[in-house]
Image (spheres, rainbow, N blue to C red):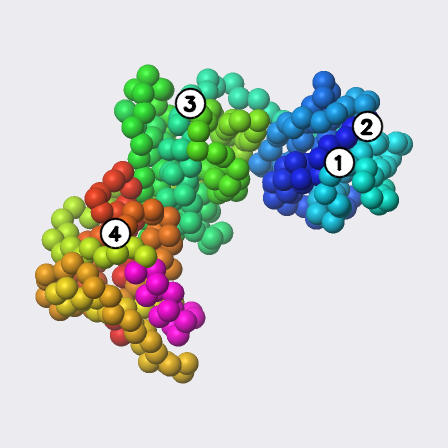
Amino acid sequence: MKFTCERSMLQKEISVAQEIISSKNVVSILSNIYLKTENDTLLIKATDNKVNFETKIPVTVLEEGSTTVFGDKFLGILNSSPDGELVFEQTSSKLTIKSAIKKANWELKSITAEKFPEFSVSTVEYFDLPIRDFKDMVQQTVFAVSDDETRYFMNGVFFEKTEDKIVMVATDGRRLAYISKPVDSSIKDFSGVIVPPKILNVLAKRAGDEGPVSISVTDKTIFVKFGYYSLSSVLLEGQFPNYRRVIPENQENFISVNRLEMLEALRRVSLLVEQKSHRVYLGLTPGNMVVYSEENEIGNSRMEIPCKYDGEEVSIALNYRYIEEPSKAMKDDDICIKFSDPTKAITIQPVPEKDFFHIVMPMQLD
């Protein structure tokens, strides 16, 4: 195998492939990235045995062939290589990498491509969604996934098709993120599945805003295609919580505040919050919100910002990250916070309302 390629183009794809790999054992085939040259195209594959990644880039093929190389060191070489064209040549059990511009070269040990795992293929028909919509769904939910491995059924994003819409939901037990998008009713319904965040994060990072994304969902695997990328992931097992039960029906109190001013207040006040609880307080009076932290060993902080509110004076205690993260995911100028009681769930939405919302459980005031 021998080919030439621009460093920057290959570096970008290998960095994504390396994110997929979980094993750092140099002797493991799962630590390696698969490379195959054919018809002036380089096929790149990576896997951790649960998430599979595949893409293609144009190269100049001088000799067709295939191999696998240790991903961590391969990416390190590309990161430190001079800009411009690189020459790659597989001989025996080594891949030689040379700069076409400067006198620099590396030899990286390889493992035969025959030992690389075969990727499964979907047996269920794909359906298309606008990639902009799908990225929006991921970005509005994936940060709310639980990292508590004892509650593995919350370690992913719930994904389902019902009637004329696609729904994504994530929760960690103290907050919930929900978004839905209308779709063609001809797309077959599928029961809710739990998608690990790894594949969703890659999609959100690599996908553009134009064109479709093709999705296929089987009993145990989700398959995603967009552009030159193909990904698949084993689904998480378990029963996702009944999210419909925690969506508040009536919340008569309404606060409207500038999103960027809210983020600025949270950023400043969070510097002096208690690091274990991350608790901040929202002190509300008509037309005014005070974001403040309680007195602790470090100190305290407060910042006032204007808001639209005409209810009674009240304080709500919240984990500041649970307001900050959905506020960052939104792009709207203003957000609204709805509540019925400072001890019950609040709802965070954009102004005007759209197809998503975030529910947060408050903390104790004392």
**At which x and y percent is residue 159?**
39, 35
Amino acid identity at mark 2: Lys
Disc ID at residue 128: 3
First reached walking from the N terminus: tag 3 or tag 4:
3
Disc ID at residue 334: 4
Tell me if residue 112 comes above or below residue 336 in the rendering: above
**Which mark is in front, 3 or 4?**
4
Say if mark 3 contacts mark 4, CB within 8 Å: no
- For the residues labelled 1 and 2, the Cα–Cα distance comes to 13 Å
First reached walking from the N terminus: tag 3 or tag 2:
2
**Which mark is in front, 1 or 3?**
1
**Residue 246 seen in the current view:** no
Going by the image, does 300 lie left or right of 80?
left
**Which mark is in front, 1 or 2?**
1
- For the residues labelled 1 and 4, the Cα–Cα distance comes to 48 Å
What residue did someone put label 1 on?
85
Disc ID at residue 314: none
- For the residues labelled 1 and 3, the Cα–Cα distance comes to 36 Å
Regarding mark 1 in the picture, which secondary structure is present there?
strand
Magenta residues, as a range?
Answer: 261-277
- For the residues labelled 2 and 4, the Cα–Cα distance comes to 55 Å
Does the magenta run of residues contain 55? no
Going by the image, does 316 lie left or right of 79?
left
What residue did someone put label 2 on?
2
Tell me the residue at 38%/38% (across/down). Answer: 137
**At which x and y percent is residue 340?**
15, 56
